[in-house]
Image (spheres, helix red, strand yellow):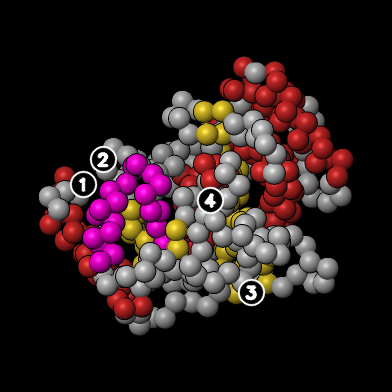
Amino acid sequence: MDSPYSKELHVAIGAIQSAAKISQSVISAEDKGTIKKDDLSPVTVADFAIQALLTATIHHAFPADKFVGEESAADLRDSQTLRDRVWDLLRRLEEDEKQSLCKLPESPDQMCEMIDWCGFGEPGGPGAGRVWVFDPIDGTKTFVQREAYAINVALLEASKQVLSIVGCPTLPVDAEAPVSNTTVDPSGQGCIAFAAKGYGTYVRTLTESLGSTQVRKIEPLPETAMPQDLRAVSCYHMLDSGVDDAHQAIMERLGISSRGCDFLAWVLRWVSLGLGLANMTVWVYKRRDRGGNVWDHAGAMLLFEEIGGKITDIDGKDIDLSVGRKLTSNHGFVAAPRAIHAMVLQTVHEVLQAQGRVHLLA
């Protein structure tokens, strides 16, 4: 892809390739160094190591840029054993790493400092400048089960998505729907999906092939999409934050009989949409005060938008990435081809009203 972000893309792809080596070394281990955070979600030594790697590499290339990421280094500062394990992962990567683009922290203290740059970072508003957003492992719950996960890297400018790079170690570059948490790439190569604002969405292998790496541009969605063309991606009975019976009723009312693609990780749901493996998703939270995390959606949504998809919340509002680490200005998600997004959104409202859940609408 020839875009103004060629250097950023080159650096980010190299960093994700190195990050995937870390993740694959941990996913194959019996002890993944898993702990539970305050919100009861899991985090592993791979999450910390990858966030440090991504930050160090991109900071070296773009020293003026800022960062937001899911993890902070508090647990590493509290546990010398955990901190040593994360540092050891990075040191082992350094011994094997031959790519000059990959940069690592110079010490355990700097490692913790760089992780905290992300853990305390904010996307900021229109005057925030360039901010990189990382989810080092999206889908940690499935990762610890040796199933699907993604490494999400996004670049925001003035709080708007301009670049998305997502590493998907378990997803084949030529994947066909339906795909799910248990999908395995038989080649072991995985894929990287990437997009730049105004330049389309592309996919390539995650690992370098023996020959030249093939890059494929994803075909745009038809401008005259019809309801019968809808193909869903969702998360079936894996999270307690959504209204499963509403999601099912919405699919039935839209005439969608197949469960389609099924992923726990939000980033992989956006990847499925961006690669054309699905073309719609709906998510309604059980409460209005529940919302998404910026690292689960920033950048990855661009993959779908760049092929002609439209994404709003269930109130029809654009997703606001400027408000902070939590997407507090929005409730849920509705994504569909632009031509029929309004119809899908109306269906969501009709189902929630019929189910007596008007309180979930604005």
Spatial CA span between label 4 and label 1: 29 Å
Q: Are marks 1 and 2 in contact (CB under 8 Å)?
A: yes
* Percent of width and height locating residue 178: 48, 67
Q: Which residues are magenta?
A: 233-252
Secondary structure, mark 1, is helix
Say whether disc 3 or disc 1 marks the residue closer to the N-terminus. 3
Q: Are marks 4 and 1 in contact (CB under 8 Å)?
A: no
In front of the other: 202 or 68: 202
Secondary structure, mark 2, is loop
Secondary structure, mark 4, is strand
Q: Amino acid at mark 1?
A: Leu
Secondary structure, mark 3, is strand
Residue indicated by mark 4: 156
Spatial CA span between label 1 and label 2: 7 Å
Q: Amino acid at mark 4?
A: Leu
In front of the other: 242 or 91: 242
* Percent of width and height locating residue 117: 61, 32
Residue indicated by mark 3: 216
The answer to whether residue 174 is seen in the rendering is: yes
Spatial CA span between label 3 and label 1: 40 Å
Residue indicated by mark 2: 287
Spatial CA span between label 3 and label 4: 24 Å
Residue indicated by mark 1: 360
* Percent of width and height locating residue 146: 61, 47
Spatial CA span between label 2 and label 3: 40 Å
Q: Nearer the viewer, mark 4 or mark 1?
A: 1
State the quadrant of the N terminus: bottom right
